Image (cartoon, rainbow, N blue to C red):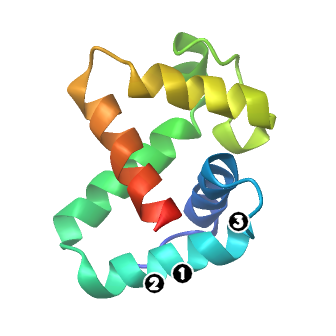
Amino acid sequence: MTAFSPSELETLGALAGTFVPAANPARVATLAAQGLTRAADPAQIRQLRLVLRLLEQPLANLASGAGFARFRDLDLPARERLLLRWANSPLVLRRSAVNALRKLLTF
């Protein structure tokens, strides 16, 4: 099993809080991580963890127009703008990542 780090769970929680602001982000993140760990292909989990780490890189977020900050440190409107940029990106991997995370965290 591939356990998620506390940092990755925080980022997953920030994503959950962005997609569904009324939800309990920590609970959604924990449930999603547990479900993935039990059912998903380890290669898919590695890819998801890579995306979570990328979202926490201030330099990557600066390049995406979100400012020099970790994703989980952005306020809700800034997180929404960043995810919208990714969702409309010419890069298929970014669009796929946002769609997969949205589906996972809103299920």
* Residue that carries the numbered disc 1 in the rendered image: 31
Which circle's residue, 2 or 3, is located before the other in the chain?
A: 3
| Picture coordinates of residue 73, whole percent (x, y) | 78, 39
Q: Say what amino acid the circle numbered 1 marks.
A: Leu
| Picture coordinates of residue 79, whole percent (x, y) | 67, 33
- In-front residue for pair 41/54: 41
In three-dimensional space, the C-alpha distance between marks 2 and 3, rounded to whole angstroms, equals 14 Å
**Horizontal side, residue 101 vs residue 64: left or right:** left
Q: Say what amino acid the circle numbered 2 marks.
A: Gln
Residue 63 makes an appearance in the image? yes
Determine whether the residue tagged by mark 2 lies in a helix, strand or loop. Answer: helix
Q: Who's the residue at 60% across and 66% down the image?
A: 9
- In-front residue for pair 12/87: 87
* Residue that carries the numbered disc 2 in the rendered image: 34
Q: Who's the residue at 74% across and 53% down the image?
A: 21
In three-dimensional space, the C-alpha distance between marks 1 and 2, rounded to whole angstroms, equals 5 Å
- In-front residue for pair 102/35: 102
Residue 1 makes an appearance in the image? no
| Picture coordinates of residue 100, whole percent (x, y) | 34, 51
The residue carrying pointer 3 sits among few (fewer than 14), some (14 to 19) or many (20 or more) residues within 10 Å by Cα, namely many
Q: Check whether the beta carbons of the residues at disc 2 and disc 3 lie within 8 A of each other.
A: no
Which circle's residue, 3 or 1, is located before the other in the chain?
A: 3
**Horizontal side, residue 71 vs residue 96: left or right:** right
| Picture coordinates of residue 10, whole percent (x, y) | 67, 60
* Residue that carries the numbered disc 3 in the rendered image: 25
